[in-house]
């Protein structure tokens, strides 16, 4: 008889945002007269920009002609997109990345979950706590996380790096040596970030102990401070110890069209084995590429017109960040984040549990957020709000919260 991958049975409960979706759906069904505002899941609300729409229409027309029709995309992605990424995201910042080190995908979530496949099952992972759940869950599925302890809410073989108020919501070098280190800056969920000299310490540490950093830079477009790095490759020596994952979802609104990329430098090696051809092999075997029309749309954001539109789009959400930050502070909440990231991390009042605060917010204010404990035990007593709503909905949501 067939068997199942029993590592899946080690996962506690359902995926965080699936649980939230079920709770919200049940509330709406029971309260059809209530208008629920969601500042929970990090989904965007603004439409795709005009240059992106033009590129989509043009690419669709190409698919209607035998002369310009496109089938399977190249394994790494179309060269026109990879060159645009190289020139605008890296070369413009003084970073030397080759086009064959850039792998186009259907989003950062997919790559975050899949990248662990090129590493040995015996690797020890280190994650921030709280953390984006995909990092841990994908390693649980592969059998790398050990046994889950419901009392501590931690897996036995995972190194947790607490990110608390005492650490300014940033991780510290762990006492136990990891093989793989997951870092996300600007951070999801806390909205925190670190300066370049602090990130350099992580790069130096990884090179010293032979660890690989998986660096999630999905929110780099929201950085406003000059001394905060947009890429880990701005740090000296990062190409020998780091993989970088990026997304078009939040900066260009591609949550529904799906596009991202991962950079795996050829210098990144385990002994004499380069990780670049391993990821290329995995990519070519298990992925048939993002659609041509989507890659063409992605390239449009690097045009002069596209850059201006993206700046305006991000500015829209940054206005929401300010509304949330200022509103919560005026109501007496203790908050952080929201400066270099679209996430605001608030401390629940009177030490209320995260899920209890979720229920209160939903039932009494009809506002949806994300319980901090869903991101890890150090997130207990905290709550995440996103700036991806409309201006009108965001302002109304904050007014409702202030009235609680």
Image: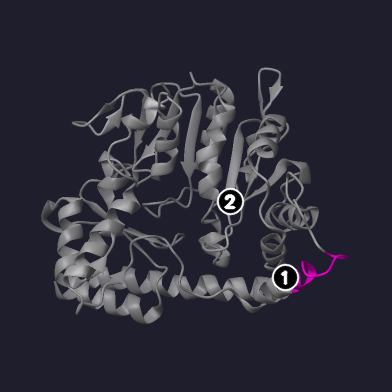
Residue 96: percent from the left, percent from the top? Answer: 75, 45
Q: Which residue is under mark 2?
A: 246
User: Can you tell which mark lies on residue 14?
Assistant: none
Quadrant location of residue 215?
A: top right
How many numbered marks, from 0 up?
A: 2
Residue 172 in view (yes/no): no
Find the magenta span and give its range: 58-68
Instruction: Identify the mark nearer the N-term, 1 or 2.
Output: 1
Residue identified by numbered label 1:
60
Q: Is residue 16 visible?
A: yes
Residue 67 counted in the magenta span: yes
Secondary structure found at label 1: helix
Determine whether 228 is above or below 325 in the image. above
Q: CA distance from mark 1 to mark 2?
A: 25 Å
Answer with left or right where residue 225 lies relative to residue 176.
right
Q: Position of residue 371 (x, y in %)?
A: 26, 53
Who's the residue at 48% across and 37% down the image? 182
- Magenta includes 206? no
Which quarter of the figure is the N terminus placed in?
top left
Mark 1 residue crowding within 10 angstroms, few (<14) / some (14–19) / many (20+): some
> What is the quadrant of residue 310 in the picture?
bottom right
Residue at the extreme front: 1
Q: Position of residue 70 (x, y in %)?
A: 79, 59
Q: Is residue 271 left or right of residue 216?
A: right
- Label 2 neighbour load within 10 Å: few <14, some 14-19, many 20+: many
Q: Secondary structure at mark 2?
A: strand
Give the label, 1 or 2, closer to the camera.
1
- Percent across and percent down for residue 242 are 60, 35
């Amino acid at each position: 008889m067939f068997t199942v991958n029993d590592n899946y049975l080690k996962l506690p409960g359902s995926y965080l945002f699936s649980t939230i979706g079920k709770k919200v759906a049940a509330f709406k069904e029971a309260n059809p007269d209530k208008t629920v505002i969601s500042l929970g899941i990090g989904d965007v609300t603004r439409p795709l920009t005009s240059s992106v729409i033009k590129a989509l229409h043009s690419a669709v027309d190409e698919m209607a002609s035998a002369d310009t029709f496109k089938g399977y995309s190249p394994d790494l992605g179309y060269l026109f997109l990879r060159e645009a990424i190289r020139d605008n995201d890296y070369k413009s910042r003084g970073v030397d990345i080759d086009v064959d080190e850039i792998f186009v995908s259907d989003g950062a979530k997919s790559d975050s979950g899949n990248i662990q496949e090129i590493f040995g099952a015996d690797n020890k992972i280190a994650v921030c706590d709280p953390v984006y759940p995909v990092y841990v869950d994908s390693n649980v599925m592969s059998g790398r996380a050990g046994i889950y302890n419901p009392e501590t809410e931690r897996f036995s073989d995972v190194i947790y790096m607490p990110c608390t108020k005492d650490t300014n919501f940033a991780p510290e070098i762990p006492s136990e040596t990891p093989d793989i280190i997951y870092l996300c800056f600007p951070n999801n969920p806390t909205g925190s970030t670190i300066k370049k000299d602090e990130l350099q310490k992580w790069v130096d540490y990884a090179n010293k102990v032979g660890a690989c950093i998986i660096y999630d830079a999905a929110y780099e477009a929201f950085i406003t401070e000059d001394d905060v790095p947009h890429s880990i490759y701005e740090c000296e020596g990062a190409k020998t110890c780091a993989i970088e994952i990026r997304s078009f979802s939040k900066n260009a609104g591609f949550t529904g069209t799906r596009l991202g990329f991962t950079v795996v430098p050829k210098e990144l090696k385990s002994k004499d084995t380069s990780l670049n051809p391993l990821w290329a092999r995995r990519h070519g075997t298990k992925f048939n590429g993002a659609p041509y029309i989507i890659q063409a749309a992605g390239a449009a954001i690097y045009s002069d017109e596209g850059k201006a539109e993206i700046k305006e789009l991000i500015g829209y959400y940054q206005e929401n960040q300010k509304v949330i930050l200022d509103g919560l502070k005026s109501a007496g909440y203790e908050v952080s984040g929201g400066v270099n990231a679209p996430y605001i991390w608030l401390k629940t009042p009177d030490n209320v549990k995260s899920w209890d605060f979720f229920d209160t917010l939903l039932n009494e204010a009809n506002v949806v957020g994300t319980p901090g404990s869903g991101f890890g035990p150090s997130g207990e007593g905290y709550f995440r709000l996103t700036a991806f709503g409309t201006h009108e909905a965001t302002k109304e949501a904050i007014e409702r919260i202030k009235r609680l």
